[in-house]
Amino acid sequence: MNGVTARALQSFIQTTYGDAVWAAVLADSRVEVPSFELMLNYAPQLTERVLGAAAKHLNRAPDEVLEDLGLFLVSHADMQPLRRLLRFGGVDFAAFVQSMGDLPERARMVLPHATMPPIRPVDEGDGRWAIFCGRRPEGMVHVIRGGIRAMADDYGALATVELGPDEGPNHRLDVTILSDHFSEGRVFDLAAQAE
């Protein structure tokens, strides 16, 4: 687990559930540092221990914790730089989904140490998209699924995002856009520095 992912998980748990829950997760994980550093890499086994302890304390499956992390990264007020980066993907949700193949490179411009799988969106017509995500880093497909769901809300679109059958070396997400303009969506000004 790289420091960006570890720090994001820490921020999500502390902000959403509090410092006491984070301390309990660290204790159960047998992690000896009180905080993760953005620029460091951590052993993959640490990922499993921290995620497993978080799932236990939150009474959720590990995949659900990762999906909630994706929702948090897009929708929480402290994460506005990431939201801005994602909104550069297009003027509406369909354009955002179409541009997802560029997301790993855009993320590296802002967070050089971030690790994202390759992403390939395929337009299947009638508002249906298949998003193919590489398998590494492990679990990232669930973070991406949560992020896509949060972006649909951000744009005001009505969409479903489901895990599809894996295809070869990739995970598959099935995105169905039922309405690209279902609600007003969140205010976004491309020129604004902060909201």
Image (tube, grey):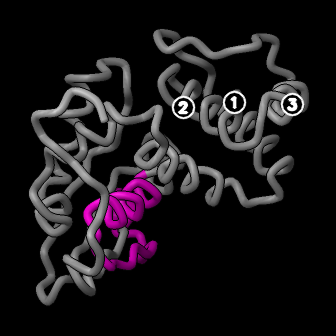
Q: Is residue 133 above or below residue 2?
A: below
Q: Is residue 136 above or below residue 4?
A: below
- The residues tagged by marks 3 and 1 sit, at their Cα atoms, a distance apart of 23 Å
Q: In this figure, which residue is indicated by the disc labeled 1?
A: 45
In the rendered image, residue 157 lying in the magenta stretch gets the answer yes
Number of callouts:
3
Residue 127 lies, in percent from the top left, at 18, 83
167 or 54, nearer to the observer: 54
Residue 77 lies, in percent from the top left, at 46, 38
Q: Which secondary structure, mark 1?
A: helix
- Of labels 3 and 1, earlier in sequence is 3
Between disc 3 and disc 1, the foreground one is 3
Between disc 1 and disc 2, the foreground one is 2
Left or right, residue 84 beside residue 48: left
Between disc 3 and disc 2, the foreground one is 3
Stretch in magenta: 144-172
Q: Which disc is residue 8 wearing?
A: 2
Q: Is residue 27 above or below residue 118?
A: above
Q: Which secondary structure, mark 3?
A: helix
- The residues tagged by marks 3 and 2 sit, at their Cα atoms, a distance apart of 17 Å
Q: In this figure, which residue is indicated by the disc labeled 3?
A: 20
Which residue is at 56% across, 11% downward? 37
For badge 1, the amino acid type reads: Gln
For badge 2, the amino acid type reads: Ala
Bin the neighbour count of mark 2 within 10 Å (Cα to Cα): few under 14, some 14-19, many 20 and up.
Answer: some
Residue 138 lies, in percent from the top left, at 52, 45
Q: Which disc is residue 154 wearing?
A: none
